[in-house]
Structure formats: structure tokens, C-alpha cells
Image (cartoon, rainbow, N blue to C red):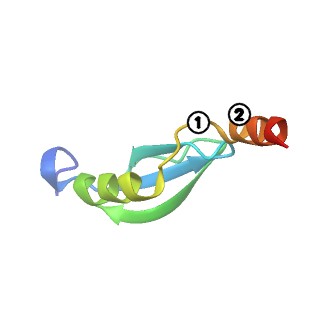
């Protein structure tokens, strides 16, 4: 099986700042990241990202802004 083009498997990763990344399933997950969501086609993983990653600001910035609003 080829790992290029439409046949490649992908995973969705998240880091401590709640930022996401689309990652080749055949590569080691880098430090500071963990797998969330589906493993599958690029399109399936992108659809998941579109659904869950609605605020691209890092968690630390969202938290700081929330504290300032209080």
C-alpha cells in the first residue's frame, strides 16, 4: 500500500495549547502532542478538524482573555 496520495492514512493531533494538526499516521507522534479524533483519509480528518477546531486561538490566550473579562 502506498502512503502517498489518496491512500495515505492520517491522524489528528492536539497539543497542550489545544491546537490541532493533521499528521501522517505512519510517522511517530512528536513530543507534546497526542492523537485525538479519527484515523483515516485526509478528507475524514479534515472534516473532524472543521467540526471541532472552531477557535484557533491558543488555550493560554483564550484563558487570559476570559480572566480579563471577569
Per the model, the C-alpha gap separating discs 2 and 1 is 6 Å
Residue 57's label in the rendered image is: 1
Going by the image, does 64 lie left or right of 51? Answer: right
10 Å crowding of disc 1: few (<14), some (14-19), many (20+): few
User: Looking at the image, how many numbered discs can be counted on the residues?
Assistant: 2
Q: Which mark is residue 61?
A: 2
Mark 2 falls on what kind of element? Answer: helix
Q: Looking at the image, which residue is at 63% across and 37% down?
A: 58
Farthest-out residue, bottom: 38
Q: State whether residue 1 is above or below residue 19.
A: below
Task: Please report the residue visible at 52 percent of the width from the left and 61 percent of the height from the top.
Answer: 36
Residue sitting nearer the eye, 25 or 70: 70
Residue at position x 46%, y 43% from top?
A: 21
Q: Quadrant of the N terminus?
A: bottom left
Residue at the farthest front position? 70
Q: Nearer the viewer, residue 4 or 10?
A: 10
In contact (CB < 8 Å): disc 2 and disc 1: yes
Direction from residue 54 to residue 4 in the image, left or right: left
Q: Position of residue 70 (x, y in %)?
A: 85, 43
Tell me the residue at 79%/39% (across/down): 69
In this view of the protein, which residue sits in the foreground, 19 or 10? Answer: 19
Residue 35 position in % (x across, y down): 53, 58
Q: Front-most of 65 and 39?
A: 65
Tag 1's secondary structure? loop
Q: Is residue 46 above or below residue 44?
A: above
Can residue 25 be spotted in the picture?
A: no
Amino acid at each position: 500500500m502506498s502512503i502517498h496520495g489518496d491512500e495515505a492514512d492520517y491522524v489528528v493531533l492536539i497539543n497542550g495549547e489545544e491546537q490541532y494538526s493533521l499528521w501522517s499516521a505512519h510517522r511517530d507522534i512528536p513530543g507534546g502532542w497526542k492523537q485525538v479524533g479519527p484515523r483515516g483519509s485526509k478528507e475524514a480528518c479534515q472534516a473532524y478538524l472543521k467540526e471541532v477546531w472552531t477557535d484557533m486561538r491558543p488555550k493560554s490566550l483564550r484563558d487570559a482573555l476570559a480572566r480579563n473579562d471577569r
